[in-house]
Image: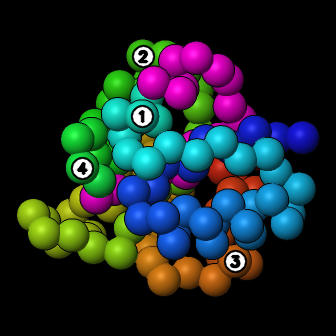
Amino acid sequence: MKRILLVEDQPLVRKAVRGALEDAGFEVVEAADGEEGLSVARQSTFDLAIVDIWMPRVDGIEFLKQVRGVHAELPVVIISGGGPDAPLEVKAHLAQAHGATEVLFKPFEDEELLAAVNRALVH
């Protein structure tokens, strides 16, 4: 069973994404923000991380930069619905420049999520 680290600060989004992933047969470990996600990533191994861009304390871009020091080859799917300090497209390009495997824009359907996850896992 593939293990996925889900780093998302919005509880309802986390619950929905977790449900879709578990229904598809993945094991999911949750973190409520990037700082917690990095702590979890340092303690365990994962096949994939799904990370929101806009989070308090440590955002998704900083998570990407730091997780590379722990798990250099970890595929990361960035998810975002927009945020306050830069256009979504700018953050998406920045995420890809820092090694995001996929970028998904909220709202997305479960099928879109699972397709991105499957592409990232074979990347």
Q: Which residues are magenta?
A: 39-54
Badge 1 vs badge 2, beta-carbon distance below 8 Å:
no
* Residue at (71% x, 47% y) in the render: 28
- Percent across and percent down for residue 53 are 33, 56
| Relative vertical location of residue 68 with respect to residue 118 in this rendering, above or below | above
Who comes first in sequence, dot 1 or dot 2? Answer: 1
State the mark number for residue 36. Answer: 1
Who comes first in sequence, dot 1 or dot 3? Answer: 1
Going by the numbered disc 1, the residue's amino acid type is Glu
Viewer-nearest of discs 4 and 2: 4
Q: Quadrant of residue 1?
A: top right
* Residue at (24% x, 49% y) in the render: 56
Mark 1 → mark 3, Cα distance in angstroms: 25 Å
Mark 1 → mark 2, Cα distance in angstroms: 16 Å
Q: In the rendered image, which residue does mark 3 sit on?
A: 110
Q: Is residue 30 left or right of residue 94?
A: right
